[in-house]
Image (cartoon, helix red, strand yellow):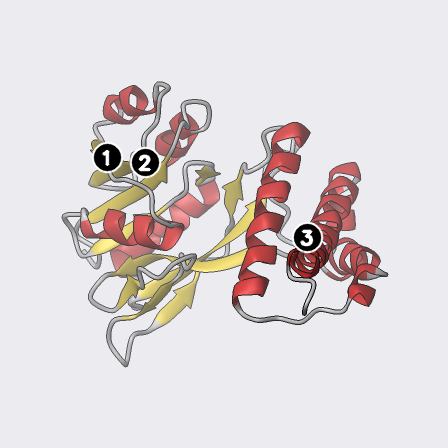
């Protein structure tokens, strides 16, 4: 067998609603399940252990640190990474099973597509994320850097292939939670811009949301998702606007507090 043993690792935090579907979709594909938790107060631990997972607490520092720690807890060289809101559909499961038998690469890109209410699976024609999620840790490994959750080469001649079928990503839980998420994310983006010494003009506020909407809705083909594609495109364009608005807010407060500038 090409991949004799395979570990699954998942990072989680209060994921009792979505984790069962994730683990159910992968349980027959892997030989070990590792769930690294950053302090859940719901039934996440109970659910993980019901699938035979090793449940490990690790205090959150950043997503980059958390996935690196989780990867290191796996027993086997070959690992599969899933987030707690991701599901492997049957077609992808069959593809991974074939790779385990006769694959010839060190790592495999698993495309990740969004699934919204009323959808059965992700639409492959809408722009989706692409990450190496099935890989040999001797060839590819998590960097452990802040905010970086993609693998980097562990050896110079590491090879990679790509799966045809998509992971179903159930990131959307409600509009209320989505808006809260975008608000926090815009805080992070604005703060990072300040830390990096960016100097955005206030004129960026004009038109930035319109351009972002057109990018997602038209160029990234979210119009194929119907009303949910429209809603998503509006939300992410507003996130873009909030980033520049909060940067402008910081600059104005800075001038008020330092009138000599």
Which of the marked residues, 1 or 3, is nearer the chain's N terminus? 1
User: At which x and y percent is residue 124?
Assistant: 62, 52
Question: Disc 2 designates what residue?
Answer: 38
- Distance from disc 1 to disc 3, alpha carbons, whole Å, reads 34 Å
Q: Quadrant of the C terminus?
A: bottom right
Which of the marked residues, 1 or 2, is nearer the chain's N terminus? 2
User: At which x and y percent is residue 207?
Assistant: 85, 61
Question: Disc 1 designates what residue?
Answer: 57
Q: Is residue 154 above or below residue 207?
A: below
Q: Do the numbered discs 1 and 2 sit on residues whose CB atoms are within 8 Å?
A: yes
Name the side, left or right, on which 212 lies relative to 167.
right
Q: Secondary structure at mark 3?
A: helix
User: At which x and y percent is residue 127?
Assistant: 64, 57
Name the side, left or right, on which 79 lies relative to 43.
left
Frontmost residue, 57 versus 161: 57
Frontmost residue, 147 versus 228: 147
The residue lying at 25 percent from left, 42 percent from top is: 30
Name the side, left or right, on which 30 lies relative to 250.
left
Mark sitting on residue 246: 3
Q: Quadrant of the N terminus?
A: bottom left
């Amino acid at each position: 067998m090409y991949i004799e043993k395979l570990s699954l690792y998942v990072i989680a935090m209060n994921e009792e609603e979505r984790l069962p579907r994730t683990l159910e979709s992968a349980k027959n594909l892997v030989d070990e399940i590792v769930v690294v938790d950053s302090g859940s107060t719901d039934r996440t631990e109970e659910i993980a252990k019901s699938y035979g997972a090793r449940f490990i607490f690790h205090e959150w520092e950043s997503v980059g640190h958390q996935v690196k720690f989780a990867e290191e807890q796996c027993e086997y060289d070959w690992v599969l990474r899933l987030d707690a809101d991701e599901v492997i559909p049957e077609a992808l499961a069959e593809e991974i099973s074939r790779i385990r038998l006769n694959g010839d690469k060190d790592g495999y890109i698993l495309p990740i597509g969004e699934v919204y209410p009323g959808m059965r699976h992700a639409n492959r024609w809408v722009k989706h994320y692409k990450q190496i999620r099935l890989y040999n840790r001797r060839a590819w490994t998590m960097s452990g850097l802040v905010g970086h959750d993609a693998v980097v080469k562990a050896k110079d001649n590491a090879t990679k292939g790509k799966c045809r079928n998509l992971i179903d990503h159930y990131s959307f839980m409600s509009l209320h939670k989505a808006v809260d998420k975008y608000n926090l994310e815009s805080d992070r983006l604005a703060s990072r811009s300040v830390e990096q010494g960016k100097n955005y003009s206030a004129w960026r506020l004009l038109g930035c949301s319109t351009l972002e909407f057109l990018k997602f809705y038209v160029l990234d083909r979210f119009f194929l998702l119907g009303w949910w594609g429209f809603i998503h495109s509006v939300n992410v364009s507003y996130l873009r606007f909030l980033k520049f608005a909060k940067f402008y807010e910081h600059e104005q407060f800075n001038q008020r507090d330092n009138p000599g500038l």
